[in-house]
Image: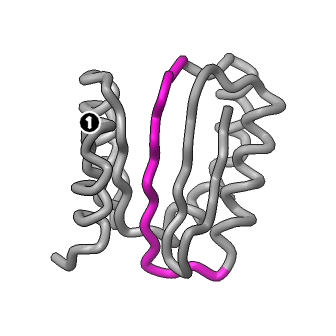
């Protein structure tokens, strides 16, 4: 399952659960681009409920859309990831270190208020 909701002019909330196949990945990427239309200096809150690696087909879709996804990522400067899996928290923060201009911080799922406060805080 993948859901994206624009909760303000500069914030997307994204819920991910289960495994994405190629069709679901294509819909998810389209939804992200559509919901982020006109955003600048945006924030994302990812709630990762029950993560499974995407299918090979889904990874292929994602790789084929790298140019449009780079444009999408440039609209955001912060992302908070909620997850109860320690390895996913580590990977999320490593990913943030690799993407210029995007700071990613991971929180346990029970720390949603803290994650939201961090998203809204100014550096």
Q: Toward the viewer: 94 or 12? A: 12
In the structure shown, which secondary structural element does the residue marked by tag 1 occupy?
loop
Location of residue 106 with respect to 52 vertically, above or below: below
Location of residue 12 with respect to 122 vertically, above or below: above
What residue sits 63% from the left and 69% below the top?
A: 36
Q: Toward the viewer: 33 or 10? A: 10
Q: Which residue is under mark 1?
A: 108
| Furthest-right residue in this view | 23
Q: Quadrant of the C terminus?
A: bottom left
What residue sits 56% from the left and 69% below the top?
A: 7
Location of residue 62 with respect to 101 vertically, above or below: above
Residue 101 falls within the magenta-colored stretch: no
What residue sits 55% from the left and 49% below the top?
A: 14
Question: Where is residue 114 drawn, in percent x and y?
Answer: 22, 55
What residue sits 43% from the left and 78% below the top?
A: 41
Residue 50 falls within the magenta-colored stretch: yes
Question: Where is residue 31 drawn, in percent x and y?
Answer: 74, 55
Q: How many marks?
A: 1
Q: Toward the viewer: 98 or 38? A: 38
Q: Taking 5 as reference, is 8 left or right?
A: left
Question: Can residue 94 be seen by looking at this rendering?
Answer: no
| Furthest-left residue in this view | 123
Q: Quadrant of the N terminus?
A: top right
Q: Range of the magenta residues?
A: 38-52
Residue 20 appears in which quarter of the rendering?
top right
Question: Where is residue 45 drawn, in percent x and y?
Answer: 43, 54
Question: Can residue 29 be seen by looking at this rendering?
Answer: yes
Instruction: Name the chief secondary structure element in magenta.
Output: strand
Residue 53 appears in which quarter of the rendering?
top right
Question: Where is residue 101 drawn, in percent x and y?
Answer: 34, 66
Q: Taking 123 as reference, is 56 left or right?
A: right
Figure coloring:
one colour
């Amino acid at each position: 399952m993948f859901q994206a909701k624009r909760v303000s002019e500069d914030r997307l909330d994204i819920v991910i659960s289960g495994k994405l196949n190629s069709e679901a990945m294509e819909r998810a990427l389209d939804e992200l681009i559509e919901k982020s239309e006109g955003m600048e200096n945006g924030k994302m809150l990812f709630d990762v409920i029950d993560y499974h690696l995407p299918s090979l087909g889904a990874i292929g879709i994602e790789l084929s859309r790298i140019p449009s996804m780079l444009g999408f990522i440039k609209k955001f400067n912060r992302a908070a990831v909620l997850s109860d899996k320690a390895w996913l928290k580590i990977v999320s923060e490593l990913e943030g270190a690799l993407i210029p201009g995007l700071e990613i911080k991971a929180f346990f799922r029970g720390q949603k208020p803290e994650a939201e406060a961090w998203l809204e805080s100014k550096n």
